[in-house]
Image (cartoon, helix red, strand yellow):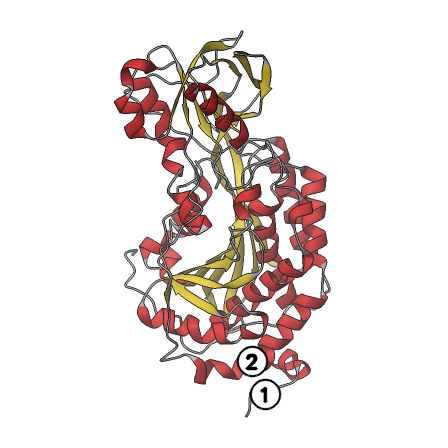
Amino acid sequence: MTWRWTLAVGVAVFGAGAQRERAEWVRVQTVGTSVPTQGMGTDSLGRYQALADSLIDAALRDSTGYHRLGALVDGFGSRLSGSRSLEQAIDWVLGEMRRDGLANVRGERVMVPHWERGAESAMLVAPRRVALHVLGLGGTVGTPAGGLTAPVLVVRTFDDLRARAAEARGRIVLFDIPWDTALDPSSAYDALTSYRYRAPAAAARVGAVGVLIRSLTPVSMQSPHTGGTAYDSASRRLPIAAVSVEDAAMLHRMQDRGTRVVVRLTLSGRTLPDAASRNVVGELVGRERPDEVVVLGGHIDSWDVGEGAMDDGGGAVAAWEAVRLMARLGLRPRRTVRVVLWTNEENGGRGMRAYRDAHRTALNQHMLAIESDDGVFSPRGFVFTGSDSGAGTLGGIGHLLDRIGAGRITRGDADGDLEALAPLGVPAARLDVDPSRYYWYHHSASDTFSVIDAGEMARCVAALAVTAFVAADMTDAMPRTRATVP
């Protein structure tokens, strides 16, 4: 029998399923090594091309995912862990998944951090009075009720701070760390994230009273960018906020002229007791090996500014939409395809660890875990973590996506919500998208539905759907490294 079937034949064979229409962690730098296709690559997986084309065509025609993302972010807004809006959004997603006809739809309980931003501001007091553009970092402690007024010391790096330690006592330290435009965007971001996490302790050790950092972005229109911070248990906890690129540059110029710079910083962030949340789970149950699972997903939570449309509403909905499309077309692979929308990726990673722990005894039956958490811009392929033979197999699947430019497979380390699974032997793949605009909007008030392009998102859905379906349906399981779970 040939696999050059029409969609109608494909549905007849696979069609036993549903028929209805329906903090932040520091990224590990990936190594952009191209993967050769061999073993179970092009020749054996090419038989899926007609079916892959049918999924691609359906994704490009069907705008349900795009409109659902709009309904999610317009209806519930930002979704920080511990917030009412996150839990209401989860309730809505669970209801929609059930209406889609997905099986075993459920929320798996997770206790998450609960930090609230409260009111915040920053004012340049001298040499002139002007409001600065500021966002407290997630988890920051608050300032005294009337604010913290102190002179500012601008430094570039941790080494620069150590060299000027005698000047830092009693001051607000501003780290004006430039974005390296010579690097690719992800590498440039990775090079700077340690300032969000390590700056409070570094400043406290030299006697500073507060911390500002230049926002981690290559492009700014007076738009500050937030993100998680951390505290050293041996150091005083200092309030910390991000200022816009423009404001950081202005304060630095003033200091370079010998001008005394004074800022009043007011933050009222507070950490409350942990709150109950849920990972969202829905399934398309496999027709032959239902206990073997291909997982795909993104994270449902977001920072509390903007709408979390790109980070990571788009990725979460695209993964959900990929499974919905399989169900709508009546496709049931050999193995179960499970969509998971993880909670608390942004400021704790509790969702990924809770999923790992709840499913630990079944991780040997997790054939592949796929994540979309870099925006839903034009897809280029996948970054794979796993064995060489697994990379070769994924390379074969990638060829099925060449027509939409999403067939490139590179090797790299897992990040985001796959960091808990890959070390336990689960092959991991994250959707690789055009990174050129991601950090323009990342963790800022600009992360709204308006940055989402329907055509780009549709191609992301197609890439996720084809990859998940074929990995779940091919005769042999995805080759993997030896699992370290029971």
Q: Quadrant of the N terminus?
A: bottom right
Residue at x 37% of width, y 30% of height:
156
Q: Against 193, is 421 above or below?
A: below
Residue 183 x, y percent position in the rendering: 41, 50
When asked about the image quadrant of residue 259, the answer is: top left
Q: Which mark is residue 155?
A: none
**Which type of secondary structure does the marked residue at label 1 adopt?**
loop
Q: Which mark is residue 49?
A: 2
**Of 2 and 282, the residue lying toward us:** 2
Residue 258 x, y percent position in the rendering: 42, 15
Mark 2 neighbour class, 10 Å CA radius: few under 14, some 14 to 19, many 20 or more: some
**Which type of secondary structure does the marked residue at label 2 adopt?**
helix
Q: Count numbered badges in the picture.
A: 2
Q: Against 19, is 164 above or below?
A: above
Q: Quadrant of the C terminus?
A: bottom left
Specify the farthest residue to the top. Answer: 146
Looking at the image, tell me whether mark 1 or mark 2 is earlier in sequence order.
1
Which amino acid, by three-letter code, is at mark 2?
Gln
Which amino acid, by three-letter code, is at mark 1?
Arg
Specify the farthest residue to the bottom. Answer: 1
**Of 70 and 15, the residue lying toward us:** 70
- Residue at mark 1: 4
Specify the farthest residue to the front. Answer: 257
Q: Are marks 1 and 2 in contact (CB under 8 Å)?
A: yes
Residue at x 54% of width, y 74% of height:
402
439 left or right, relative to 194:
right
**Of 90 and 47, the residue lying toward us:** 47
Residue at x 53% of width, y 52% of height:
436
Residue at x 44% of width, y 12% of height:
260
Residue 371 x, y percent position in the rendering: 49, 55
User: Does residue 235 show up?
Assistant: no
Q: Against 270, is 92 above or below?
A: below
